[in-house]
Amino acid sequence: MKNFFILLISIVLASLGCAAMPDKEAPHGTVFYPPLPQQPRLQFLHAISGGHDLGKGQSAFREFLVGKHQYQTLGRPYDVGAAKDRIYVMDRMYRKIVIFDLVQKELSFLNDTGVGSLGDPSGIWVSEDDFKYVADMQRKQVVVFDANDAFFRAYGGKEVFEKPVDVAVYGSRVYVVDMEKDQLIILDKATGDVIRAVGEKGDFFNPTHVAVGPSGNVFVNDAFNFTVKKFTPDGALIDTIGFHGDNIGGFARPKGLAVDRKGNLYSVDAAFENVQIFDDQGRLLLFFGGAGNAPGSMYLPAGVAIDYRNVSYFSKYTDPNFELEYLVYVTNTYGQGKLSVYGFGHWVGESLPEE
C-alpha cells in the first residue's frame, strides 16, 4: 500500500510539472528543483548562519552577543525580509533584528533603543524604500524603523491588538494578523486608524503570517485550519488555498508566506520541511526543500521572502547553465544553515544533462 501511494504521488507530480526534492545532488554537485534531467526552476545557492558565510567576521553583532573574542551564529531565526544590499532576519532567540550587510560582508543588529525598543518581535515586513515594519507581541504594536534603521513610529497598542504576530504593507494600508483575536486587522498607514477587522468567530484559527501580492491581494496563513486565505485589499475573501493532509498541496504545519511579482504564492510548512509554490489560481506548481542534512534541505523552516534586488551577490553560486531571476530566502529554526538562499530561474544551457 505504501509503495502504491508513493507511485501515485509521483504520477500526480509528473502531471502537474512538479517534482519532489531530489534524493541526491545533480552530477556536477548542484541541487536543482525539479532535479535534472527535468527542467529546473530553482537552484539551492548558499546557506548563511554567521559572518563567515559572507566572507567576513561579524564585528558589532559578535561583540553584542558574546564579546570580542568569540564567534556567534544566528540563534533561532523566524522571519526574513530584504532591501537593496541587505537581508533582515528576525531572531527569536535574541529578540533582535539581525542585519546581513551584503556590501560589507558582515552581520550587525538593529539598534532598537529607547522608544523603539523591541520586546518580543515576531514578524517583519521590509518595504521597497527599506522601512522595517515589525510586529511585536509584547508591545502589542507594529514598530517601524526607517531606511537609516532609526525608530520612525508605532501602530496600535493594547486597545487595538492582543497578539500581533505578523505584518505586511501595501500602498496606504498596513495589514496585521492577530493570533489572539483570530483576525486580520487593516490599518490606515498614515493615521494608524483601524479601517477594518476581518474575521468573525471561527473564520480564523490561529493565523500566524500575512503577505501581500503585486496586485494588493492579501494572503493569511490560517494555521490551525491548515489553509491560506486570499483576500482583496479591502478584506473580502477571494479564495482558500490548501487543505489539512499529507498529500501534495496540503498542509500539516503551515508557516511563512511570500508572493512573487507574478502572484505565485510561496508557503512554508514546518512539518513537511519544505516550501510549496502555488500559482495565482491556487494550483500547486512545485515544492522544494525537504528534511535532512543535504544541501538545500530544511530544518523546521519558518519564514520565507522573495528578493529581486540582490541577485548579483549570489550569482557566483549559480550553475553556468542556469539563469537567475530572483532569490528566495527561507529561515530554518535549527540546523547549520539558518538562512537558506535559493535562486528561481530557468535553464539556458543547450541541453539538459542526464542523471
Image: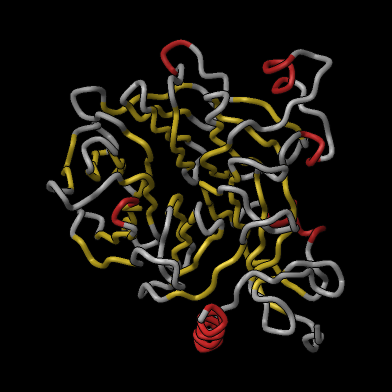
Identity of the residue furthest to the right in this view: 28
Counting from the top left corner in percent of width and height, residue 227 is at: 33, 60
- Image quarter where the C terminus lies is bottom right
Identity of the residue furthest to the front in this view: 1
Q: Which colour assignment does the render follow? A: secondary structure
Identity of the residue furthest to the top in this view: 114
Left or right: residue 86 versus residue 201 is right
Which residue sits at x=80%, y=67%? Answer: 30
Counting from the top left corner in percent of width and height, residue 55 is at: 84, 39
Q: Is residue 216 visible?
A: no
Which residue sits at x=23%, y=50%? Answer: 204
Residue 58 higher or lower than 47, as above or below: above
Counting from the top left corner in percent of width and height, residue 136 is at: 39, 28
Left or right: residue 278 versus residue 226 is right
Residue 215 higher or lower than 118, as above or below: below
Which residue sits at x=56%, y=29%? Answer: 97
- For the image shown, how many numbered marks are present on the structure? 0
Viewer-side residue, 114 vs 180? 180
Left or right: residue 15 versus residue 320 is left
Which residue sits at x=46%, y=50%? Answer: 256
Viewer-side residue, 193 vs 109? 109
Q: Residue 56, located in which quarter of the rendered image?
A: top right
Counting from the top left corner in percent of width and height, residue 157 is at: 26, 23
Q: Is residue 123 visible?
A: yes
